[in-house]
Amino acid sequence: MKSFYKFYAVVIAVILFIFAAANSILLRIEKGGAGRPYRVEAERLVKEIGEKGLENISLSKYHYITNIEVIPQGQDRESSLGKENDFYEGSGSDYIIRKAGQKLIRFDYQSSAGLGRSNLIAAVNAALGVMSLLILAILVYIQHNILKPFQSLRQVPYELSRGNLTVPVKESRHRYFGKFVWGINMLRENMEQQKQRELALVHDKKTLVLSISHDIKTPLSAIKLYAQALSRELYKDAAKKKEIAESINEKADEIEKFVSQIIKASNEDFLNLETKQEEFYLSALVHKTSQYYKEKLGLVRISFSVGSYGDCILKGDFDRSIEVLQNLIENAVKYGDGHLIELLFAEESGCQLVMVKNSGCTLPETELPHIFDSFWRGSNTGSNAGSGLGLAICRQLMHKMNGDIFAEIQGDVMCITLVFMKS
């Protein structure tokens, strides 16, 4: 804010400089030759008086000369001197004296055609004053309506980064920051909910691990006892040894079952994603996605085309659907050859199909069944960074919206299809 006050001072200084410069220029014009049109008219009148005589002169066509006086010639010297003094003092207005023949003539004039000099300067100063007030009003408006509200929000990101999520940001109906504050509060609430979910997840995982660890102890202890018995050759009968081996195998199956439960629970908790059940237009989904990627892919010279489609109402979560579609396009950019990405559409059995195709697919078909598995990355990833969760998240989101997702390789083209339920 201090820098803005400095800017205030600079603006005021510039305004004062403009005032001083404008007045200086006006005064210079009035005093300079270029600003003396009355002299031109006076010379024309001198010439006209010489040709027509003073009594035949009309001042109606002259804009600056307002009056003509000839030096009076009195009969006595005292009277003549008095009239000459009056002649040279003038009538209070500006004048110049010229000689026409044998006579001295005084030409009274005004410095501008419609305004006196003082009126012209006053008008210019008034215009500059109005302009200055307008500029200052705009600066005050910017300070009060934009900078001041923003100052109150500058600590919000810092507080969020420190984990202070419980205190909401005071909402405002301000036309510039109302939606921004609302969005910050939504972000804060989502972060708070995510934090609570993470705490609950950690608690559940610890409980699960403790519970299953306790359950594993029983079959594990049995296996150890059987192993000790076999190592000491306590059982001589072959049938008994076979029975013990089968028991060990059963206990190992129990342990394997517990391990599978841990893996399954971990995956389900890790990808615990929430969706809303709502309705939205296909055109809204396509427009919001294509509007962003047409510009982004154009910058890196990747051809991006959107096929024709019939607009319809889809069921699902609009924001999550955009997230899924963006994830597929990002994968097409990352793992394609950078030549072509297509967004195509089809209808099948009351469902809307949305297909993302990219050229340059190098994924072996044998790996295709695994691309939706958590933490799995194909052999075509190369040096591209990633976690192997993108498509797994897409699949879970589509399933939660009662839709589906599948992939196929068509030659060197990868095609991933989203299946949406129609309303």
Image (cartoon, rainbow, N blue to C red):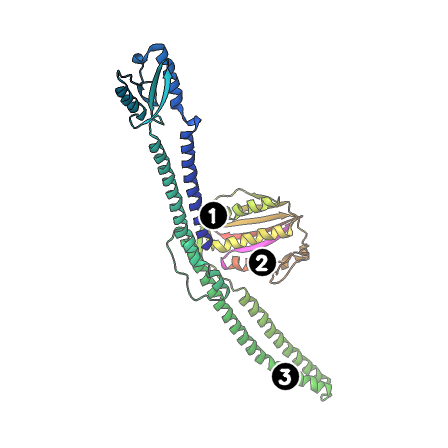
Q: Main secondary structure of the magenta part?
A: strand
Marks 3 and 1: which is nearer the front?
Answer: 1
Q: Which residue is mark 2?
A: 390
Please give the name of the residue rendered at 50% of the width and 71% of the height, measured from the top-left corner: 199
Mark 2 / mark 3, whichever is N-terminal: 3
Residue 232 coordinates in the image, percent (x, y): 73, 88
Secondary structure type for disc 3: helix
Magenta stretch: residue 221 in it?
Answer: no
Residue 319 in view (yes/no): yes
Evaluate whether residue 423 shows in this view.
Answer: no
Assess whether mark 3 and mark 2 are in contact (beta carbons under 8 angstroms). no
SS category of the residue bearing label 1: helix
Outermost residue to the front? 77
Q: In this orientation, which residue lies closer to the viewer: 85 or 66?
A: 85
Image location of residue 181, percent across then percent down = 42, 57
Q: Residues within 10 Å of mark 1 (few under 14, many from 20)?
A: some
Q: Which amino acid does the dot numbered 1 rest on?
A: Ala
Q: Earlier in the sequence, mark 2 or mark 1?
A: 1
Q: Is residue 81 left or right of residue 155?
A: left
Q: What residue is at 52 percent from the left and 54 percent from the top?
A: 323
Residue at 28%, 19% in the rendered image = 77
The residue that disc 1 covers is 284
Number of labels in the image equals: 3
